[in-house]
Image (cartoon, rainbow, N blue to C red):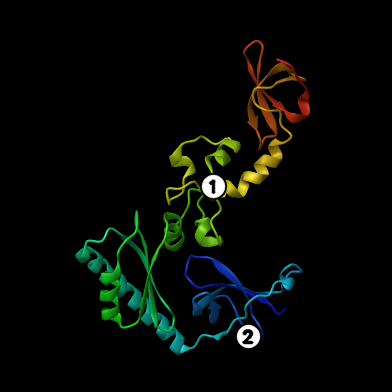
Amino acid sequence: MGKIVGVCVEPGHRMYNYNAGLFVLSRGSRVMVETEHGLELGTIVTPPRPASEEESNIRLKKVYRLANDADLAQNRKNVELQTQAHAYCLRCIDELGLEMNLVSVRSQFDGSKLTFYFTADGRVDFRELVKMLTKAYRMRIELRQIGVRNRAKICGGIGRCGHSHCCSAFMNDFEPVSIRMAKEQGLLLNPTKISGLCGRLMCCLAFEHKTYCDLKSGFPEAGKYVRTKMGRGKVVRQNVLKESITIKTDEGHELDVGLDQIIEETAA
């Protein structure tokens, strides 16, 4: 395999690795690459580098070619079309009284198709809307209903951690996230603290769930009694990252005890 470059098709969104082939590329170079939507204009965001041993076994798509002036002009035309189509679709939705929220409009690079992404509480009869859009733009029109998580992925943004949304930065699919994962990690079950901008539980809870479960397997359970070098007490909290527990002694005092200070579990 040749060298690998990181390509970003949409600014601020996920980077994809491509085989650079024989092209001489640098950060900021504009290239044409194959995506699930066909050929797209992308920007090199990481310079060419040798493939690792693990990456050498993965079949990556190659950079199709360098972008030319015609490609850049087509991209500017597409951006303008998307902006106009977004505004026109909003007016049509308002005119038809449809209960739907338009999220984004995407133009296929060759200008042959427009896809309108929207959210709604239920099913929406948008047949009249499609007719109005087709009449106005004379091209293939697709309306695609998405969920609130996909809306966050398309729109992007900054999470409470200060980084870009995981969903728009690197995630392919959404994994199930449950409140039990937050409990396992000892987080306060405050919806405003454990929910993302989409209003759903943060995806990163699922990323760290297995690690917390593995670490907690060596901890005595809350409610159990243990004998430690600092005395006997009831486990009231597990401090996973500190590798310690908090016990309540028979005298009513709370003590932080390291796992290496636990002698044995005892009966109540």
Q: Which of the numbered marks, if any, corresponds to residue 143?
A: none
Q: Circle 1 sits in a helix, a strand or a loop, which is it?
A: loop
The residue lying at 70 percent from left, 39 percent from top is 215
Residue 66: which quarter of the image? bottom right
Number of numbered callouts drawn:
2
State left or right for residue 154 relative to residue 132. right
Query: Mark 1 — residue?
Result: 177
> 222 or 5: nearer the eye?
222
In the picture as drawn, the residue positioned furthest to the right comes out as 263
Q: Nearer the viewer, mark 1 or mark 2?
A: 1
Mark 2: amino acid: Phe
Q: Is residue 267 above or below residue 130?
A: above
Mark 1: amino acid: Val
The residue lying at 50 percent from left, 61 percent from top is 168
x and y, in percent, of residue 225 in the image: 70, 19
Decide if residue 64 is in sight here. Answer: yes
x and y, in percent, of residue 173 in the image: 55, 59
> 163 or 119: nearer the eye?
119
Q: Residues within 10 Å of mark 2 (few under 14, many from 20)?
A: some
Q: Residues within 10 Å of mark 1 (few under 14, many from 20)?
A: some
State left or right for residue 18 relative to residue 167. right
State left or right for residue 104 relative to residue 43. left
Pick whichever of labels 1 and 2 is earlier in the sequence: 2
Query: Mark 2 — residue?
Result: 23
3D distance between C-alphas at marks 1 and 2: 42 Å
Q: Circle 2 sits in a helix, a strand or a loop, which is it?
A: loop
Q: Is residue 114 above or below residue 229?
A: below
State left or right for residue 252 relative to residue 231. left
Residue 183: which quarter of the image? top right
